Image (tube, coloured by chain):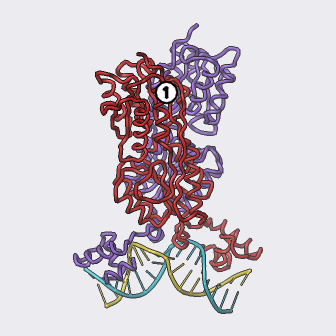
Chain colours: A purple, B red, C cyan, D yellow
Amino acid sequence: MIDVAQSAGVSIATVSAFVNGSANVSAELRQRIETAIRDIGYKRNAIARSLKMGTTHTIGLTVPHITNPFFTEVVSVIQQAFDRAGYAVMLFCTDEHLHNQDDQIGLLLDRMVDGLIVARVGDDAKFREIIGGASVPVVLIDRLCRGVETDAVVLDNRQAVFEAISYMIGLGHRRIGYISGDVDVSTIRERGEGYRRAMEAAGLAVSDELVRLGDFHEADGYRAAMQLLMLPDRPTAIFSANNPMVVGAMKALRDLGLTCPDDISVACFDDFAWADVFQPQMTTIAQPVQAIGEQAARLMLDRLGGKAPAEPRVVTLRGRLMIRNSCAPARR
Amino acid sequence: MIDVAQSAGVSIATVSAFVNGSANVSAELRQRIETAIRDIGYKRNAIARSLKMGTTHTIGLTVPHITNPFFTEVVSVIQQAFDRAGYAVMLFCTDEHLHNQDDQIGLLLDRMVDGLIVARVGDDAKFREIIGGASVPVVLIDRLCRGVETDAVVLDNRQAVFEAISYMIGLGHRRIGYISGDVDVSTIRERGEGYRRAMEAAGLAVSDELVRLGDFHEADGYRAAMQLLMLPDRPTAIFSANNPMVVGAMKALRDLGLTCPDDISVACFDDFAWADVFQPQMTTIAQPVQAIGEQAARLMLDRLGGKAPAEPRVVTLRGRLMIRNSCAPARR
DNA sequence: TTGTATGCGTTATCAG
DNA sequence: CTGATAACGCATACAA
């Protein structure tokens, strides 16, 4: 920039004014500067600008797994929204590990991101501390954190699962296996409650053997489904609390020579692109990924723009039960 | 940091030395500084550091669509690799738009990323100019660019498609529809060649009506498959050049009341997690996503570490035909 | 309307 | 082993 100034025979302040379009620069100088910029091949240095301005126009985003289609789509929407708003997004995947998350958020904060959007992991004091100490706006997506008061966009998980399980019960199923994720996660707790309430509302017993804890991954779903399917009194239906685990569960069915929905009915949380193309067409709870991403971006942008109330805003969205053909009436 | 120095009663240079672990700081001062840091709640400012050092420990990554499972997985691998190496990655999705790509790469360069990994779009001079003018290492993934000499990791697309089409021909298919992406993209051109060569090698005519151009999206695959399926002399098999388009194609089959593989055999480029769980189990060409991501990261890290030859290195990987049950012998 | 000087938080060079 | 000081590239208050 200093070179440009010299080349154009003006001061660097004038160049700066021109580049930012702020001050009124005479048409003649404007021309001189323009050509000088082209000659030199000048590009503004956003880092220096950030240091001076205290804003990086970058937001940090951490999710547990980008390969989980739910997060893939949310990330995609968020990325696009911020792209439109002139922000870059730094993406980290915590892989469900606490220490990863802490490190990554630390890196993000060091880099002076203007805001943080996180789908968090675990439930520890350190996270509260980090987020509490952050001087930038934070919006939580998908998963809440006890004791942390920030903007958030979440789903009514309890209601969604209640509806899905009730649907299965309506089909005549009485023993419904449930594959859960790590109960340290708020969404998982709520989904578990939805399951329990639906069972209880129908006067059905929820025995411990029907509920299997997984850790979000496909392999966990496989293992959990295997255990469920080996039970002496095998469940007639299985519900999986997320998408990767249902893939594992379907593999377990396949390996056991069982078919869905003839032998076992299956449903899961989170919709995916192929759900209504391949057989069985999976009955799922579709989260409004577009809305989730857009709301998260809006909350953040509002706060960045200073037009947000002081108190945290949490928007709660509703899931939608997509009934397809992976659940059949129970045979008695 | 200046506060820390005051609080600890030392100069800021000493604090800096301590933080970077570079110089030898006496044990006593070390203690004083450590507590001061904790008291103040000091965090090093990576932006200021970057400005001074000329390195951001950040790399820029642009892909056409994050929701395309191929890119999802590559992004995931790349992200993890750089995370391990202490780098952050800034992600952009070009959505197959040239101007997006140019803008985004510009933003990335402004932000002084240490390197650029791009799965590019289109084939225009401006891209060459931007990349040529970039003073940071660039590694191209998936798609090459004519006239640009940089590190790259690509697939032998021609060979992979040749193999897949030959497999279909071996099943007795003679009229094989081909759903292509935009031919401005190197991978797409190569895949098209693979198709043509396989057909020719078998003495089969490749008529124009059998080849449909799409634009990578599901809707394009739907439209293309519809056209193919409406042909007076309908093809007995269809190959799709990418994954989103095959989903569209399968929807077209479904809407026409056709089943796969009984009525039409289908195969596509790019494997996906559900391929061997749902019916039909899709026959695909699996790209070694893990290797692609790791090699890209390695090429970049090598160059960043200064331990790379001056001349560009392009590593070519091979796809693997995953034969499942979406292709049946042709009925005559 | 345009130029000069200062500081953003670091690191690095050089004296002490 | 430690302290003062000059950049890094930019924006801005203030002076001209």
Closest to the observer, B306 or A245? B306
Residue found at the very far right of the displayed protein: B27
Give the side of residue B47 with respect to residue B197, left or right: right
- Residue at the limit of the structure toward the left, as seen here: A27
Between B208 and B239, the one nearer to me in the picture: B208
x and y, in percent, of residue B17 in the image: 66, 74
Locate the C terminus of chain A by quadrant: top right
Q: In this rendering, would B290 be left or right of A294?
A: right
Q: Quadrant of the N terminus of chain A?
A: bottom left
Q: How many marks?
A: 1
Residue depicted at x 53% and y 60% = B58
Percent of width and height locating residue A105:
58, 55
Question: Is residue B142 placed above or below B230 in the rendered structure?
Answer: below
Q: Quadrant of residue A46?
A: bottom left
- The relative height of residue C10 versus residue A226 in the rendered view (above or below) is below
Label 1: element kind? strand
- Residue A288 appears anywhere in the view: no
The residue drawn where x is 29% and y is 74% is A35
Judging depth in this view, the residue of A134 and B163 nearest the camera is B163
Can you see residue B13? yes
- In the displayed structure, does residue A239 sit left or right of residue B268? right
* Residue receiving disc 1: A284
Label 1 CA crowd tier, 10 Å (few <14, some 14–19, many 20+) = many
Looking at the rendered structure, the kind of residue marked 1 is Thr
Q: Position of residue A11 (x, y in %)?
A: 34, 82
- Can you give x and y, in whole percent of width and height, for residue A250 in the image? 58, 25
User: Which residue corresponds to the image point at 50% horizontal and 22% vertical from the top-left?
Assistant: B279
